[in-house]
């Protein structure tokens, strides 16, 4: 018995009467000889997607799809069982060796602990008047002359009224007072000190 890799397109040829390929017949004989195929984890999704599209376009019938799948599950086909970390590392290594821009899709916890993101300072911490100590995304891309930065958290309602109206728009004090009296503008500062419970990033992704 030997192992071989089989592409989804080869196996699908058996289900589509208008398709034919010498390789498909050869693969069928390999299965009859007791050989085992190994396929990637997304292989079943490729098979099912092609069958659904073929049925929708009336190239194959629902009965033929059902019969094909019943036969397919009896064949010695094994999904690769490599841990995700090994697959990701292998793909990244191949990408670097061949100068191909690829990387794995990371969740927020992966990003928060990734050495590259940490070295680039992609997460910053600051004190928010409502939420307390928080952590969020830094500035990207980073430029040498205009690096950017986070100088405060989100303002509370009305925090910048005076600066915007008086300093930027140059409204006189009596006009600003009138707007406040009429309810056009208002302020809602924090009612108390910042929250004391652990910050979001400590609860969700760790220190």
Image (cartoon, rainbow, N blue to C red):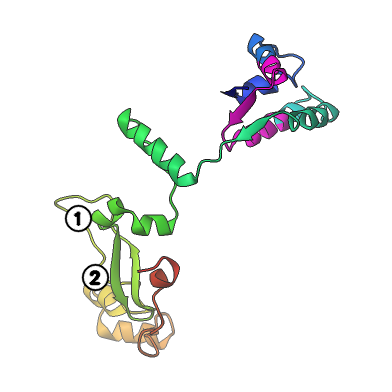
Q: Residue furthest front?
A: 1
In the drawing, does residue 173 fall left or right of residue 63? left
Give whichever of 158, 83 is nearer the camera.
83
Image position, residue 67 (x, y; %): 82, 28
Q: Earlier in the sequence, mark 2 or mark 1?
A: 1
Among the 4 quarters of the image, the one containing residue 98: top left
Image position, residue 51 (x, y; %): 72, 29
Image position, residue 175 (x, y; %): 31, 82
Q: Residue furthest top?
A: 22
Image position, residue 113 (x, y; %): 35, 58
Give whichever of 37, 119 is nearer the camera.
37
Label 2: which secondary element: helix
Give whichever of 133, 63 is nearer the camera.
63
Name the residue: 39% across, 75% down: 199
For the C terminus, the quadrant is bottom left
Say which mark, if any, is on residue 57. Answer: none
Nearer the observer: mark 2 or 1; the answer is: 1
Secondary structure mainly formed by the magenta segment? helix
Residue on which disc 1 sits:
147
50, above or below 191, in the image: above
Residue on which disc 2 sits:
168
Give whichever of 205, 152 is nearer the camera.
205
Work out whether residue 114 can be spotted.
yes
Q: How many marks?
A: 2
Write the start and end of the magenta stretch as one range.
Answer: 27-52
Work out whether residue 120 can be spotted.
no
Label 1: which secondary element: loop
């Amino acid at each position: 018995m030997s192992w071989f890799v089989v592409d989804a397109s080869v196996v699908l040829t058996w289900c589509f009467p208008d398709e034919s390929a010498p390789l498909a017949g050869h693969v069928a004989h390999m299965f009859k000889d007791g050989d085992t195929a190994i396929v990637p984890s997304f292989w079943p999704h490729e098979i099912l997607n092609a069958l659904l599209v073929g049925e929708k376009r009336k190239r194959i019938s629902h009965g033929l799809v059902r019969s094909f799948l019943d036969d397919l599950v009896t064949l010695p086909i094994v999904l690769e069982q490599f841990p995700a970390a090994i697959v990701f590392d292998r793909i990244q290594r191949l990408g670097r060796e061949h100068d191909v821009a690829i990387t794995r899709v990371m969740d927020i916890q992966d990003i928060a602990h990734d050495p590259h993101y940490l070295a680039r300072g992609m997460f910053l911490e600051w004190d928010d008047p409502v939420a307390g100590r928080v952590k969020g995304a830094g500035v990207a891309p980073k430029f040498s002359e205009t690096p950017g930065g986070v100088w405060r958290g989100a303002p509370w309602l009305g925090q910048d009224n005076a600066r915007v109206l008086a300093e930027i728009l140059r409204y006189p004090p009596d006009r600003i007072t009138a707007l406040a009296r009429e309810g056009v503008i208002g302020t809602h500062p924090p009612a108390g000190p910042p929250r004391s419970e652990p910050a979001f990033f400590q609860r969700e992704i760790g220190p």
